[in-house]
Amino acid sequence: MMQSKDRLDVLTIAEQWKRDGRALALATVIKTWGSAPRPVGAHLVIDGDGNFEGSVSGGCVEGSVITEAMDVIADGQARTLSFGVADETAWEVGLSCGGEIAVYLERVT
């Protein structure tokens, strides 16, 4: 279970980055199934230069979320990203646990 301090730290960082004038997107794990690297409520904040803090997963999933965040920052359209793989291909795409996750990605205004 994620500690509430972890959530607060990412949101505090997002608040500070926003005050610094950075364009931001916030990713939040909204659903998990099976074994997942991060629990529901885990956050990742990404700025317009690709800097990030926090975690919503690992491997290729997080890289995909960061890449998608650039589009969310540019167009302002929130979206839900879903990731899931069969056990036999899990290691190839970075979800070694074989679980599924859904991540809500939104621009911070």
Image (tube, grey):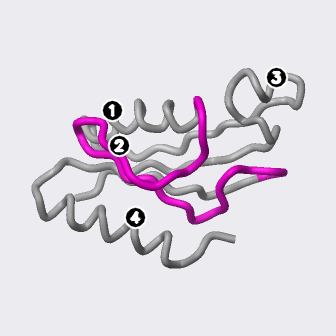
Residue for point 69% across, 25% down: 93
Q: Earlier in the sequence, mark 2 or mark 1?
A: 1
Res. 23 mark: none
Q: Nearer the viewer, mark 2 or mark 1?
A: 1
Q: Residue furthest left?
A: 21
Q: To which quarter of the image does residue 39 belong?
A: bottom right
The kind of secondary structure element at disc 1 is helix
Image position of 75 (left or right of 22)? right
Q: Residues within 10 Å of mark 3 (few under 14, many from 20)?
A: few
Image quarter hosting the C terminus: bottom left
Q: Earlier in the sequence, mark 1 or mark 3?
A: 1
Q: Mark 2 highlights which residue?
A: 77
Residue 40 lies in the magenta-colored region: yes
Say above or below: 17 vs 64: below
Q: Residue furthest bottom?
A: 4
Image position of 38 (left or right of 76)? right
Residue type at mark 4: give it. Answer: Val
Residue 77 lies, in percent from the top left, at: 35, 43
Q: CA distance from mark 4 to mark 1?
A: 21 Å
Q: Residue furthest right?
A: 88
Residue type at mark 2: give it. Answer: Gln
Say above or below: 63 vs 106: above
Residue for point 69% across, 71% down: 1
Q: Mark 1 highlights which residue?
A: 71
Say above or below: 63 vs 6: above
Q: Mark 3 highlights which residue?
A: 89
Residue for point 21% across, 58% down: 17
Res. 10 mark: 4
Residue 71 lies, in percent from the top left, at: 33, 32
Q: Earlier in the sequence, mark 2 or mark 3?
A: 2
Contact, CB < 8 Å: mark 2 with mark 1? Answer: yes
